[in-house]
């Protein structure tokens, strides 16, 4: 996946972009791989991307990390990190995979869903 785009827009704007994409598809146009997540307003976007979650995403953008490493680096409780990872994974911003951790069993490694995450918001 090339990028994840987070944006705010009205339902009309969302459907207008969807119509334009359908027209491009009908014409056989090439689409760059990616995901666009559209939120109805900046407040809803902010409820998903709190300051703590932004720090978490930023840390994972630098390098994939285990949940334990993230808790240590971000000085946060593992349970809180796990909650945030589940929410961000459900939103399509992060991914996780289980990896063997020799001598310690299995750990969950957290990665960004794409090497680039764009944030677009419009007020008004």
Image (spheres, rainbow, N blue to C red):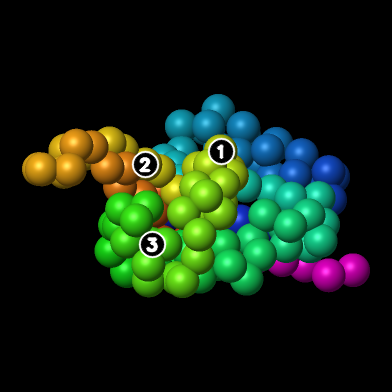
Q: Which mark is residue 101?
A: none
Instruction: Name the residue that disc number 3 marks.
Output: 70
User: In the image, is residue 70 above or below residue 75?
Assistant: above
Check disc 2 and report its element: helix, strand or loop.
strand
Q: Tell me the mark number nearer the camera, choosing from 3 and 1.
A: 3
Instruction: Name the residue that disc number 1 marks.
Output: 90
* Residue 89 image offset from top left, x and y in percent: 50, 42
Residue under the image location 72 percent in, 62 percent down: 46
Query: Left or right of 34: which side holds 52?
Result: right
Residue under the image location 31 percent in, 38 percent down: 97
The one of 48 and 67 positioned closer to us in this rendering? 67
The quarter of the image holding the C terminus is: bottom right
Secondary structure, magenta segment, majority class: loop
Residue under the image location 17 percent in, 43 percent down: 104
The quarter of the image holding the N terminus is: top left
- Is the Cβ of the residue at disc 1 closer than 8 Å to that at disc 2? no
From this viewpoint, is residue 32 visible?
no
Q: Earlier in the sequence, mark 3 or mark 1?
A: 3
* CA separation in Å, label 1 and label 2: 11 Å
* CA separation in Å, label 3 and label 1: 18 Å
From this viewpoint, is residue 14 visible?
yes
- Is the Cβ of the residue at disc 2 closer than 8 Å to that at disc 3? no
Residue under the image location 58 percent in, 67 percent down: 52
Task: Identify the magenta region.
Answer: 120-124
Check disc 1 and report its element: helix, strand or loop.
helix
Q: Among all residues in the image, which is located at the extreme left?
A: 102
Instruction: Name the residue that disc number 2 marks.
Output: 96
């Amino acid at each position: 996946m090339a990028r994840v785009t987070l944006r705010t827009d009205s339902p009309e704007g969302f459907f207008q972009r969807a119509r334009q994409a359908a027209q491009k598809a009908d014409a056989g146009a090439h689409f760059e791989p990616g995901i666009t997540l559209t939120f109805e307003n900046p407040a809803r976007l902010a409820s998903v991307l709190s300051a703590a979650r932004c720090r978490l995403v930023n840390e994972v953008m630098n390098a994939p990390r285990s949940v334990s490493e993230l808790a240590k680096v971000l000085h946060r409780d593992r349970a809180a990190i796990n909650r945030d990872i589940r929410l961000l994974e459900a939103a399509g911003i992060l991914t996780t995979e289980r990896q063997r951790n020799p001598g310690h069993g299995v750990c969950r490694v957290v990665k960004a869903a794409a090497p680039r995450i764009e944030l677009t918001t419009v007020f008004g």
